[in-house]
Amino acid sequence: MDERSQRRYQLRAEMFKALAHPMRIYMLDKLKNRPWCVCELAAEVGIAKSVASKHLSQLKAAGLIDDEKRGTLVEYRLVASCVLEMAACAEGAILESRRKKLDVLEE
Amino acid sequence: MDERSQRRYQLRAEMFKALAHPMRIYMLDKLKNRPWCVCELAAEVGIAKSVASKHLSQLKAAGLIDDEKRGTLVEYRLVASCVLEMAACAEGAILESRRKKLDVLEE
DNA sequence: CCTCTTGTTTCAAATAATGGAAACATTGCA
DNA sequence: TGCAATGTTTCCATTATTTGAAACAAGAGG
């Protein structure tokens, strides 16, 4: 494999790794509508703020969200909003493929 | 959070987890063009067949690929082909957001 | 300056993912 | 049946991820 392809696969894997946690998906879903600060978001999803902060930093490192300091709080906002539509699309495709498999079994 | 949403986030996270490895992305990329058997694919991507088999079973469990026995070999084929377009799309969005950030810094 | 609020980082423990080697199962064929 | 080829599973060692608690940092406001 050439080096360029290797970098591309690595980049994509890192992006998917950032998405590979139910809590991070949940947080992205909240960020879809408006920006949230860490404290508020942690309370909303029911986890400690240190844990929320770490999840958010992973999403930011992957380039999926961005942050902005406003006084003592930090507002996070969605950057790559297409990832959520993407998730819904892929989920649909997978569920359909499962359904087809069940249909085949019933024939 | 209601139970239905929780299941949806879990399902999506599992799908992304299956995609969260460069080798699995690489293998999916190979499967884009035609079906491959484990042995052939393992040799192509340069890993042991037991490892390849385990990666493929993860992709299958996530509903991204499917398999079919043909004699002594097992052919794997892509099911949810949209995930690759999706990966390219998201990669583009992320790279663009990084580029924009650089532009802001340069202003 | 002091204190409160908000976020981040560090540390340690628990859990999960990965890869390699070997054992095992299945199929095709002589 | 015996053997070769293909895949899967198991076991183990290694590495990575996740979490909670506590320490730490930075800003707002008295």
Image (cartoon, coloured by chain):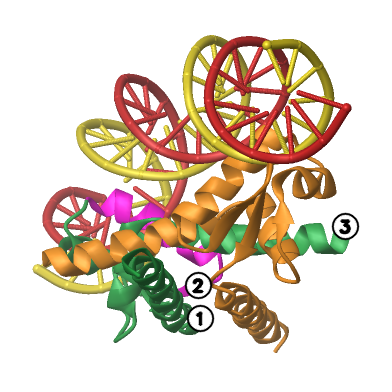
Chain colours: A orange, B green, C yellow, D red
**Residue type at the position of mark 2:** Leu
First in residue order: circle 2 vs circle 3: 3
Which element is circle 3 on? helix
Which one is in front, A71 or B85? Answer: A71
Q: Is residue B52 left or right of residue A69?
A: left
User: Label for residue B64?
Assistant: 2
Q: Amino acid at mark 1?
A: Ala
Point out the stretch of residues depicted in magenta.
Answer: B48-68
Question: From what the image shows, is residue A20 above or below residue B69?
Answer: above
Q: Amino acid at mark 3?
A: Glu
| B82, B31: nearer the viewer | B82
| Kind of element beneath mark 2 | loop
Main secondary structure along the magenta-highlighted residues: helix
Pointer 2 and pointer 1: residues touching (CB < 8 Å)?
yes
* Neighbour tally class for label 3: few under 14, some 14-19, many 20 plus, Cα within 10 Å: few
Q: Which mark is residue B80?
A: 1
Image quadrant in which the C terminus of chain B is located:
bottom left
Which label is found at residue B3? 3
Q: Position of residue B9 (x, y in %)?
A: 71, 60
| Left-right relation of B97 to A69 | left
Give me the C-alpha separation between circle 2 and circle 1. Answer: 5 Å
Snapshot quadrant of residue B31: bottom left
For the residue pair D2 and A71, the one nearer the viewer reads as A71
